[in-house]
Image: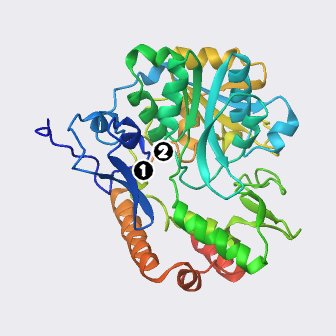
Amino acid sequence: MKDKIIKLADKSACTGCGACADACSKSCITMVRKGLHIYPQIDAEFCIGCQKCMKTCPSINPLNSVEVSIQKYYACWHKDLSAVMTSTSGGVGTALAEHAIDCDYYVAGVVLTSEGEVKHVIATNKEDIQAFKGSKYVQSNSIGIYQECMKAIKEGHKILFIGTPCQTEAMKRILHSSLQDSLLTCSIICHGVNSSFVWNDYRNSLEKKCKSHIEKYNFRCKSHGWQKQNGGPNLRVSYEMISGKKADMPSWRNLFHYWFGQHFIMRPSCFKCQYRTEDRHSDIVIGDFWNVEKVLDDMDTCNGVSAVITTTVRGEEFLHTNPYLNATPVDAQKSKSVLKGLINRKSEETQNKEILRMGTFEQEYSQDGFEYMAKKYPCPTYIDQIINKIKSMI
């Protein structure tokens, strides 16, 4: 039985989705920390060489070609303004989840727990899906969610699965072909996922500094609007402690978000992600529609606008039967040219430089810890920001 060789994705390609662990019928794969991220570890003593883990892995299996011509692009926002204002961009994720509940789906999405963990859970009602609102710029713990979704589907339920492109692909791969009609996938326009270990260290440091626990944390708040008057993203972070202390700041003044923006704590596989192409493999794709004013004239972008791409007939039907959404068709080519994060346009040289820089940061962090790195790699000052803006204009 052990004549079959088990070879999963190497460290540079593994997405950390955890589907290999869920696929293993002998439970001999565990996700363990190596550096700043988790990777699969196989217990060779119990492995029977069935290769289910390999067949499920979204990194080592070639992606099926997608008929790009059937993709349709939309600018969307929730009809309920309160849903828009409490979401990252246009509130589309909430609208999709609400419609799914109406259609007797369960919804798998990401929450930030009261303990500070970012993880995938299943919601069965509209009250529970409220926790899915807002971006969480941390790799979600999705270990176990694939098994939970399969169990629900086998019990006769339908699932709307929302996640990163590699997670939605893993969900499709782990589910038997005869059950695929019960699964609808929605992937986000992903710029890369960040270390949950650094996130935990950052939270602990912040709570120690404030002498209080975090009650609310908003990775992207709209206290100053969704977009700046000049059209750029209005990226802000806010949080509230149980003690009552509140903070609201530009993202570059927040250490975790600054490190995220510098790609110091991004997962290695994200730098050369095979999913950041024109091809998209989930039924629906959603994300911030930055630069939407370059595609649609006279568009009010103050509160937030989402980009939605339908890639299958099922995705298109689900969008058009949704009573919670305003959806305006937009030109596909124009949208592709302006959407940030949809397609990786960085040169090989630039990517390799970023990977090298990330590797250096990871090695130092693993050796010296959070507090040391916080002093060595602090947020820029206001003067630094002004200098950087001047340099970018030269």
Q: Return the mark for residue 143.
A: 2
Horizontally, residue 104 falls left or right of residue 198, namely right
Judge whether 167 appears above or below 310 on screen: below
The image shows residue 94 at horizontal and vertical percentages of: 73, 33
Name the image quarter holding residue 322: top right
Q: Quadrant of residue 370?
A: bottom right
Q: Which amino acid type corresponds to the residue marked 1 in the rendered image?
A: Gly
* Above or below: residue 333 compared with residue 154: below
Q: Position of residue 258 (x, y in %)?
A: 61, 69
Q: Quadrant of residue 176?
A: top left
Q: Secondary structure at mark 1?
A: loop
> How many marks are shown on the rendered structure?
2
Q: Nearer the viewer, mark 2 or mark 1?
A: 2
Disc 2 on helix, strand or loop?
loop
- Pointer 1 residue: 16
Question: Residue 224 at what x, y percent from top left?
Answer: 83, 57
Q: Which one is nearer the viewer's eye here, 53 or 2? A: 2
Residue 155 showing in the rendered view:
yes
Name the residue: 37% across, 35% down: 23
Of all residues shown, which one is farthest toward the left?
Answer: 3
